[in-house]
Image (tube, helix red, strand yellow):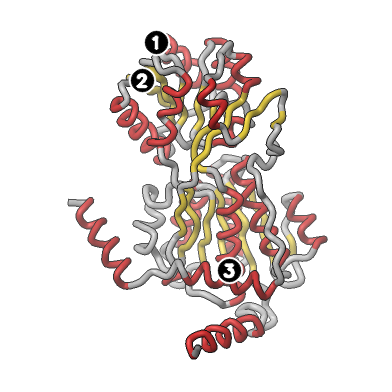
Amino acid sequence: MIKTAVLLLTLTSLLIAPTAFTQGDDKPTIAWLKWGDSSNVALAEKAILDMLEVYGFINADERALLNDERSIDGERINIIYGDSLFDRMEANAIIDEALDKDADVFLTFTTQMTQIVYYAIREFIDPPKLIFTVTSGPYITGVAQSSCVKPDFVIGTVPVTNYEDIVPLLLMQDPDMKVVGAIYSPQQRASEVGVARITEIGESLGLTVVAESIIVTPDLYQAVENLADQGAEAIIIPIFTFQGFSLLLSLTYDYGLPVVFSAPQNAYRGGTIGGGFYGLYKQGVIAGNMLVAHLNGDFDIASTSIYESDDFAFAVNLDAADLQDVEISPALLEGAAYIVENGQTAQGVSAQYPEADINLPDMLIEERRAADLAFLAGLECTPAMIAEQQAALAQANQ
């Protein structure tokens, strides 16, 4: 009874306490930075905007501006909206602009932007906070070592891509498949790691994996031709960001090769099969929770772990299969989270937001904040967790 009373008193004090950033005259400034547009990012952006709006940090008019990818000088917070359009120089320019405007928080989307921001601010004596989402590779890019072994100013959400679940989709489509082609970019560490895992898993399943690397979009012409010449019966793409999506798909139509992408939402973009992490709206909600709690002064980023989840699903695009003259197997059709046919799905999933259930549940604000704070409390990095992760890292480095 005493513990319950103390908990209720603590939550009540948090609910009525003034926010950390609004006690003075200065409003917090958030640098909202993304590497480029994708449905992955759109899902997370919607979720974070939903969280900021439901907690009253932005109003409807400010939300409309942000929906149009415009910066705001808001009533409670300022947001510097930046999109690098997949360009490293542009990314550096918008980061410099955010630093010139004394951004308190960098909110980053995708591994590429998260990595660039981290290396831009990591040497600061008192760096801005870095909250990332839709970021699959914070550990392999050096942003953090593990969920609890990380810089004190870093927090975020990681969608874990399990290639152990994705590669078998090839054999679900064609149990007699022998040779698989893979395309990756040596400029993106996550894709290099991905193709190595695909090769390892493929070989364990009796598949020969032949890989081609690309640097720029026109390289796809030669890459797909080389894979076809080596007998590839399908192409699988690890997690990696590139602008040649439409070109790659048109080439697979010409060669009659189904293409498997390591994300379900890419089935809506034209991939024959998309399998991988499914829950990007949820990732955005959690990142939004972290941002709101930080703005309210409710939690310590330094002692909170990076959130990891590995929810898996796959989707199928029958339109792409028709163009490739490929018949999708009954096993894939039966297990798909959604099926794209004639440009739409029967499951109510859209191209812009290719997931179901992408709205916050209706809750009283007091109930929502209590639940959100309880969730973050469950992410606390205990001394035992930190010691265990440090030991695992030391052993891996031996």
CB contact under 8 Å: marks 1 and 2: yes
Residue of label 3: 372
Residue 210 percent location from the top left of the image: 36, 20
Residue 298 appears in the figure: yes
**Secondary element at image label 2:** strand
Q: Distance between the residues labelled 1 and 2?
A: 9 Å
Asked where in the image residue 19 lies, by quadrant, the reply is bottom right
Q: In this view, does 359 lie to the left or right of 178?
A: right
Asked where in the image residue 373 lies, by quadrant, the reply is bottom right
Which three-letter amino acid code belongs to the residue tagged 2? Val
Residue 132 percent location from the top left of the image: 52, 56
Residue 223 percent location from the top left of the image: 45, 18
Mark number, residue 231: 1
Sequence-wise, the earlier of marks 1 and 3 is 1
Q: In this view, does 10 lie to the left or right of 348?
A: left
Sequence-wise, the earlier of marks 3 and 2 is 2
Which three-letter amino acid code belongs to the residue tagged 3? Asp
Asked where in the image residue 172 lies, by quadrant, the reply is top left
Mark number, residue 3: none
Q: Distance between the residues labelled 1 and 3?
A: 51 Å
Location of residue 157 with respect to 104 vertically, above or below: above
Q: Nearer the viewer, residue 60 or 123?
A: 60
Residue of label 2: 210
In the displayed orientation, state which residue is furthest to the right. 61
Give the crowd class for mark 1: few <14, some 14-19, many >=20 residues within 10 Å: some
Picture residue at 63% right of the left edge, 72% below the top: 369
